[in-house]
Image (cartoon, rainbow, N blue to C red):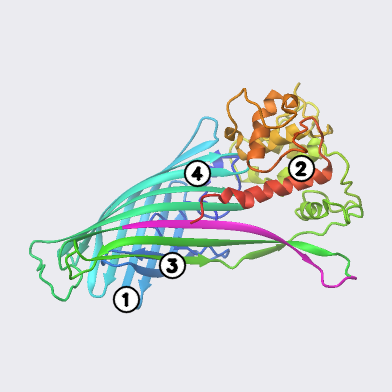
Amino acid sequence: MKRVVSVALAAIMLLSPIASEAQRGGTGFEGGIRRNERDSSKSKSYKEVIYITGEPVELAGTLETKVAAKSIRYKYELENIEKGITLSRNLTLARELSPSEDKTQVVEVNKITKYKEEIEADGDEYELVEYQFHNSTVDDNQPMVTHYQGSWNGKKVYAVNEDEAELTQTITGNTFGFDQFWGATEKQVLRYELDYEPNESTNTEDPEGEAGAGPWSGTVDTQVSINKTVKDAYIPHTNTVSSFDGIYTLSEGDETVMKYDYNLPILGENPNNYRNIGSGATSYRTTPTQEQLYIPRYVDIKTHWGEMYIKKLAGLQAASIQQKYFLPDKNITREEFAVWLVKSLRLEGMEKDSTREQTAGGEPKFEDVSKRHPNYDYIQNVRDRKIMNGVGDNRFGPEEHLTREEAAVIIARALGIERLAPNLPFYTSYGDDKNISIWAKKAVYSVNQVDIMSGYGGNFMPKGTLTRAEAAALVERIIDYMRVDLKGEYGI
């Protein structure tokens, strides 16, 4: 699952997380779900439940989405063969993207400009004659993850059998989500209100209980959850004399779920006394993609407590797999940690997709990191994203050892979680709280709140350094947080 990232937005947001395929808005705003297979087909399998006939009916078919800088187009072709229902819908929405002054937030507004929808249901024809729609979403782009929230209001008016009746369907919805390489989730919460009014000339006495027999109303509450999950697994080699012990495998798949609760009339009966009340659900799950990670050749990690963390880090090519020694108990430097973050969290190359003025690869930001420095691009990357700001006096301190409180600040900035901490001044629960620098206090509190970093024996040891094995384990915890913990309350 990935969000819509337009050409215009990519041009604005140099530092936003990587987003590959359409997600937010990718299925439209009709409350349906799409199978997000990783293939080249323009149209995707799609499901939607309609209620305009007075009962919930699941339709299935295809959705084609075309996203441009200033518009989104949707083409739906759906049917339910058993019920004898077909739906054809074409929509065009205008898009407006407004970035904040610091370019870290983007407000998107979508408005309906063109629409055509026709539904045939067992001899009855429903034609969309009026569609009002407005949606707005704000993206908060943190260095490693984008969080977003939005809402929409819509009103559809259908002419039934030309002039037999009028059906009005109002839709209100809210959406919440986040997106980054290691996982993404979107949750939509919608409410439908339906009102069916026959024209005065229509006969309301219909003992057969056919649709359109008399006025009726109903409500539907729907939740849609769209999840992209990246999983990793270590698979040991079955041959003990193989040149390697085993490999890490990454798999990526999407699951989309729709659940709904309805309160509709039983047609042919008094709609005030007899109601069709129930619930339903449907879902899609994609075939996971597979990626085998590289095999390190280190000779000094076997049986070390950090062996598996190091293997995964090297498999992601964050640490070089060409070296013979990893040196797990050696202190990690600031430049090494910068490289590991950029590579393991897949923050490389985003500048290449932007037409905004480049800073990575531009003039050096630090006096002690020239363009000839082997890790120049990675250090510029974390600086541009405001993940690592240096050690003062316009210095990065690339070869200085990374302290625990510095690591806490880097992580809190990258994930945008410093807001979890109280306002200063405050005391943490650590016995050595007085040793925590004031500039690191909120970060130390926040990373503990999300279980990424904690202390030793009741102390945080803020001035202590991190070994390379400890740093590898820390990167693993960051990935697990982004891959699992962030989903939090989004699932349904």
Specify which label sits upstream in the sequence, 1 or 3: 3
Judge by depth and name the residue closer to the eye, 427 or 85: 427
Disc 2 marks which amino acid? Val
Residue occupied by mark 3: 62
The stretch in magenta equals 220-241
Of labels 3 and 4, earlier in sequence is 3
Callout 1: helix, strand or loop? loop
Inspect this view and state whether residue 393 appears. Answer: yes
Which marked residue is nearer to the observer: mark 1 or mark 3?
1
Q: In the rendered image, is residue 385 in sight?
A: no
Q: Is 406 displayed left or right of 332 in the figure?
A: left
Measure how far apart labels 3 and 4 are at the Cα level: 27 Å
Residue 258 percent across, percent down from the top left: 44, 61
- Is residue 228 within the magenta segment? yes
Instruction: Judge whether residue 40 is colored magenta.
Output: no
Task: Give the label on residue 83, or none.
Answer: 1
Q: Main secondary structure of the magenta part?
A: strand
Q: Using the rendered view, name the quadrant where residue 203 is placed.
A: bottom left
As drawn, the label of residue 148 is 4
Which residue appears farthest toward the left when viewing the image? 201
Residue 40 position by quadrant: bottom right
Residue 178 in percent (x, y) is at 54, 47
Residue pictured at 42% horizontal, 49% vertical: 71
| Image disc number at residue 476 | none
Residue highlighted by disc 2:
339
